[in-house]
């Protein structure tokens, strides 16, 4: 039963507990075992009501109400610096536990503070390795065992009378250590909250980009989806570990156009057309046309704020068939794509007549117009 009680105290030592004043530990020990008494009052060490100078200095470093992780890291470092300096200045009684606890405390804090200073505690997203996060957590600290060993497990009705110097010294050391650890945990929790918020925002942005790739890029037929899936995987440069690629697959910023049919209007400038009087003159005609993009390439950049496709531009080799009256029905040339909405091709037939065909992606155009209206979205 005693072992279970100690384990329970170790597990819950830094959980939310009673909010007794720090100076009530003596009264608590009179009615409880020293371990349980310390557990009842330990939450006030490092709390907002803690009058200790360390706590005042620590909490005086305000935390910005922002998602700026880099700035948050600097604040955590400044707070940890207070804790490190305080731990180094502690003049605890030279018992075995005091030396051991102080060494553990300093080692942990210096490790956290050093790593934070060295690596900057930045959150970065790499195409190869995914997220790189360096946010430590406060390690588990067992204060129940040394307190029980120094003070026993029975209440002290006349505390501090009857308590050995070792018991009193151990309790004083435990107070300082609990204060520092509570403040360190508060700092790391504050940091982790911002990091997790940033990760969530980044993942939400990734989802928006994939949706935009499906909805905002040039429309694709089934064979183009297949070809572009192969293209995405061919460019995938993630690290492979045990035959498994690490991290998330890169989001594409381009696509291949292949055997893509479409319709439009073709304007053709015709040379040397014989008119009704028998003279050769230049003429023009406008005809509905079918076109086929044999092969092409489309590329864009990502808006890092909204996840939308921006500045898309593409080019393809195109063949056009139109029901022309005077010019050749078949022509070929180059087609340009702008912003995944407007397409313009310049072609030439076998008689060197120049044709211009215009096409626009009606679905993308309508979507952009609707999304520009506040409160409306079809993505």
Image (tube, grey):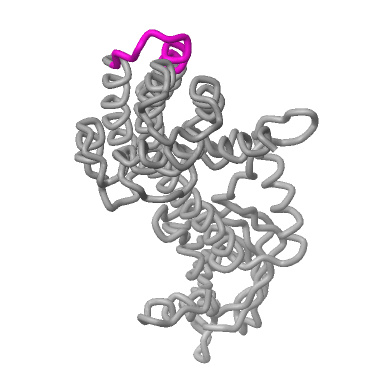
Q: Is residue 373 visible?
A: yes
Q: Is residue 359 visible?
A: no
Q: Quadrant of residue 244?
A: top right
Q: How many marks?
A: 0
Residue 94 located within the stretch drawn in magenta: yes
**Side of 102 relative to 48 (left or right):** right
Measured along the vertical axis of the image, is residue 282 above or below residue 164? below
Residue that appears at 45% across and 17% down: 101
Spot occupied by residue 226 in the image (x, y as percentages of width and height): 76, 56
What residue span does the magenta drawing correspond to?
A: 90-103
Residue 154 located within the stretch drawn in magenta: no
Residue that appears at 48% across and 70% down: 342
**Side of 177 relative to 257 (left or right):** left
Spot occupied by residue 354 in the image (x, y as percentages of width and height): 52, 67
In the depicted view, which residue is nearer to us: 183 or 179? Answer: 179
Spot occupied by residue 62 in the image (x, y as percentages of width and height): 22, 44
In the depicted view, which residue is nearer to us: 48 or 61? Answer: 48
In the depicted view, which residue is nearer to us: 275 or 326? Answer: 326
Residue that appears at 53% across and 58% down: 209
* Residue found farthest to the bottom: 276
Q: Quadrant of the N terminus?
A: top right
In the depicted view, which residue is nearer to us: 352 or 204? Answer: 204
Q: Quadrant of residue 95?
A: top left
Spot occupied by residue 174 in the image (x, y as percentages of width and height): 41, 26
Residue that appears at 39% across and 37% down: 182
């Amino acid at each position: 039963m005693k072992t279970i009680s100690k384990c329970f105290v170790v597990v819950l030592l830094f959980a939310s507990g009673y909010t007794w004043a720090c100076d009530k530990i003596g009264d608590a020990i009179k009615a409880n075992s020293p371990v349980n008494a310390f557990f009842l009052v330990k939450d006030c060490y490092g709390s907002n009501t803690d009058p200790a100078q360390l706590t005042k200095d620590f909490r005086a470093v305000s935390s910005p109400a922002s998602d700026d992780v880099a700035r948050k890291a600097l604040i955590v470092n400044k707070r940890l610096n207070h804790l490190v300096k305080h731990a180094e200045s502690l003049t605890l009684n030279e018992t075995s536990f005091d030396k051991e606890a102080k060494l553990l405390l300093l080692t942990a804090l210096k490790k956290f503070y050093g790593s934070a200073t060295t690596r900057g505690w930045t959150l970065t997203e790499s195409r190869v390795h995914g997220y790189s996060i360096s946010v430590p957590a406060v390690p588990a600290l067992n204060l129940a065992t040394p307190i029980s060993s120094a003070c026993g497990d029975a209440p002290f009705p006349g505390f501090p009378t009857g308590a050995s110097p070792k018991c009193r010294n151990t309790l004083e050391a435990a107070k300082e250590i609990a204060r520092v650890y509570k403040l360190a945990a508060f700092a790391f929790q504050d940091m982790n909250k911002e990091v997790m918020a940033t990760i969530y925002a980044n993942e939400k942005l990734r989802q928006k980009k994939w949706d935009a790739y499906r909805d905002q890029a040039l429309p694709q037929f089934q064979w183009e989806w297949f070809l572009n899936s192969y293209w995405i995987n061919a460019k995938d440069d993630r690290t492979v570990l045990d035959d498994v690629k690490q991290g998330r697959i890169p989001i594409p910023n381009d696509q291949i156009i292949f055997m893509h049919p479409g319709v439009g209007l073709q304007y053709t400038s015709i040379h040397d057309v014989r008119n009704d009087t028998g003279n050769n003159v230049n003429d023009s005609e406008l005809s509905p046309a079918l076109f086929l993009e044999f092969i092409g390439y489309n590329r864009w950049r990502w808006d890092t704020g909204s996840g939308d496709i921006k500045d898309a531009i593409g080019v393809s080799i195109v063949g056009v068939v139109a029901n022309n009256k005077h010019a050749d029905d078949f022509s070929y040339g180059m087609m340009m794509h702008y912003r995944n909405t407007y397409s313009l091709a310049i072609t030439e037939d076998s008689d060197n007549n120049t044709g211009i065909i215009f096409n626009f992606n009606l679905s993308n155009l309508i979507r952009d117009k609707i999304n520009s209206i506040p409160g409306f979205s079809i993505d």
